[in-house]
Image: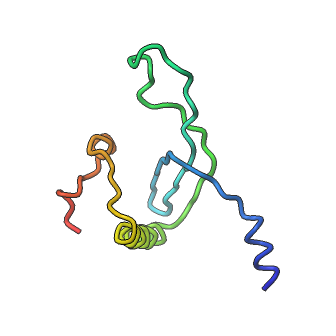
Amino acid sequence: MAESKENESSIPTYYVNAANISINPYDIVLELGIRETLPKFKQESEIPENPPVKPLVNIVMSPQHALVLNKLLKKMLHLYEVKVGKINVPKSILANLGLETEEEEDD
């Protein structure tokens, strides 16, 4: 049992705020990273639309594993919202990612 805890402490922990996803018939690849801090700009028009991302880790899994992970994430996020409150994401962000808004979801 002590060996298990020792191994857990050696697992790296990352904060990520950016993700790219690619898929092929055999694998799903999640490239997780962090948006790099931008310098101060004099005008808002100078701010790049997509700030640079520093990749931190790639996660590779089967489509089956990804499907189960998706269901688990949905379940955990639902439990979070029940306990803490609704998670709000601006509709413009969802639209830019080609995702449906809550009103359009069939779940």
Residue toward you, 23 or 43? 43
At x 60%, y 39%, the residue is 54
The part of the image, by quadrant, that contains residue 103 is: bottom left
In the displayed structure, 95 sits above or below 30; it is above
Residue toward you, 54 or 13? 13
Task: Say which quadrant the C terminus sits in.
Answer: bottom left
Q: In this view, which residue lies farthest toward the top? A: 42
State the image coordinates of residue 38 (x, y, percent, origin top left): 55, 27
State the image coordinates of residue 66 (x, y, percent, origin top left): 46, 67
At x 52%, y 54%, the residue is 30
In the displayed structure, 19 sits above or below 86; it is above
Q: Report the colour scheme.
A: rainbow
Task: Say which quadrant the N terminus sits in.
Answer: bottom right
In the displayed structure, 42 sits above or below 78; it is above
At x 38%, y 17%, the residue is 45
State the image coordinates of residue 61 (x, y, percent, origin top left): 54, 65
In the image, is 79 to the left or to the right of 36?
left
At x 73%, y 71%, the residue is 8
In the image, is 45 to the left or to the right of 65?
left
State the image coordinates of residue 44 (x, y, percent, origin top left): 40, 19
The part of the image, by quadrant, that contains residue 35 is: top right
In the image, is 16 to the left or to the right of 1?
left
